Image (spheres, grey):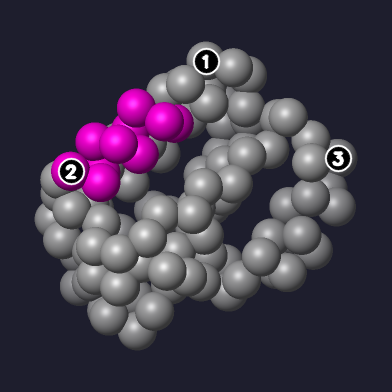
Amino acid sequence: MNSKIQILEPTGILNATKGNEIRREINDIVSAGAEKLLIDMKDVTFIDSSGLGALVSVMQSLRKTNGELFVCSINAQVKMIFELTKVDRILQILEDREEFQRKVMTTP
């Protein structure tokens, strides 16, 4: 995989603890020069406000470096939280990794 494109796969509950872990991990990824980041949430069972805050913070960090954040494979509960908080309007949400491959990795 291209080093400018990275994929994270969080698991379980995305809360304050996991959100802080993801922020640190993404800071390292961005510092290493990643331009596109996919967070595959297929194994995330629940997200709370701290987890949402972490995703928004990560997106803002990437935008500062002209990077892009993508999220895929969200379950119905996470989708509902995204919609209720309108986070779905600011995140680039894809159905799955295949859609990421088609839409993001095939564009120059």
Q: Position of residue 59 (x, y in %)?
A: 41, 39
First in residue order: circle 1 vs circle 2: 2
C-alpha separation, residue under disc 1 versus residue under disc 3: 22 Å
* Residue that mark 3 sits on: 108
In front of the other: 18 or 86: 18
| Quadrant hosting residue 37 | top right
**Does dot 2 land on a helix, a strand or a loop?**
helix
Q: Which amino acid is tagged 3?
A: Pro
Name the kind of residue labelled 2 in the image.
Thr
Mark number, residue 31: 1
Type of amino acid at the residue the image marks with label 1:
Ser
The dot on residue 22 is: none
**Range covered by the magenta-colored residues:** 17-26
Q: Quadrant of residue 35?
A: top right
Q: Earlier in the sequence, mark 1 or mark 3?
A: 1
The local secondary structure at tag 1 comes to helix
Left or right position of 85 against 21: left
Q: Is residue 85 left or right of residue 67?
A: left
Question: Looking at the image, which is closer to me, 107 or 11?
Answer: 11
Residue 79 visible in the displayed image: yes
Q: Is residue 80 above or below residue 34?
A: below
Residue 99: give x, y in percent of width and height.
70, 68
- Separation of residues labelled 1 and 2 (CA atoms): 22 Å
Task: Determine the residue positioned at 44% across, 31% down.
Answer: 26
Crowdedness of circle 2 by 10 Å Cα count: few (<14), some, many (20+)?
few
Provide the residue designation for mark 2: 17
